[in-house]
Amino acid sequence: KGDERIELKVTTKPNKGLIRVVGSRSHPSPDLAEFVKRFDEVEMVSKGSSLKLCLVAEGSADIYPRLGPTCEWDTGAGHAIAEIAGAKVTKLDGSPLIYNTKDEYLNPYFVVSAVEE
């Protein structure tokens, strides 16, 4: 059973306008509250740590805006899983979130989202 492969795939068709937004369980922010105002109908899903990236990867969430401090080690594994499943992981300006490029290990704000086919 340990060698069983499970295919992950992001959702490509949100539920009739409902956007499932994953957010921090322990760090809610005013920036996140402002971010979700752009969507008509939102279901908030609160989870901790890199699990939020994995929820987008498995299709249980449509978007994860991270608008608070994280370090590279908090997100690296979840980032890899999300991209393998077809998600897009970008900084707020749309450029890729990349690692190990500076002296500090804090991530900028970023968004993980399902990419339409």
Image: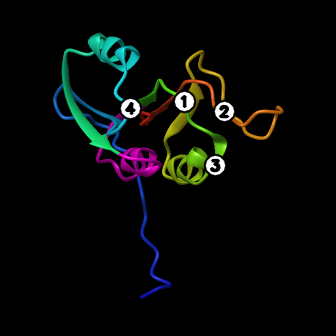
**The one of 20 and 24 positioned closer to us in this rendering:** 24
Secondary structure, mark 1, is loop
Q: CA distance from mark 1 to mark 3?
A: 12 Å
Colouring of the image: rainbow
Percent of width and height locating residue 21: 30, 32
Q: Is residue 18 above or below residue 45?
A: above
Percent of width and height locating residue 78: 53, 51
Q: CA distance from mark 4 to mark 3?
A: 17 Å
**Of marks 4 and 2, which one's residue comes earlier in the chain?**
4
Q: Which residues are magenta?
A: 48-64
Residue at coordinates 65% horizontally, 23% vertically from top-left? 95
Q: Are marks 4 and 3 in contact (CB under 8 Å)?
A: no
Q: CA distance from mark 2 to mark 3?
A: 9 Å
Which of labels 4 and 3 is toward the front?
4
Q: Are marks 1 and 2 in contact (CB under 8 Å)?
A: yes
Residue 39 forms part of the magenta stretch: no
Q: Which residue is mark 4?
A: 27
**The one of 25 and 76 positioned closer to us in this rendering:** 25
Q: Which residue is mark 1?
A: 69
Q: Is residue 3 above or below residue 20?
A: below
- Quadrant into which the C terminus falls: top left
Secondary structure, mark 4, is loop
Q: Which residue is mark 3?
A: 73
Q: Quadrant of residue 104?
A: top right
Q: How many marks?
A: 4
Taking the view exactly as shown, the residue that stands out farthest to the bottom is 1
**Of marks 1 and 2, which one's residue comes earlier in the chain?**
1
- Quadrant into which the N terminus falls: bottom left
Q: Which residue is mark 2?
A: 106
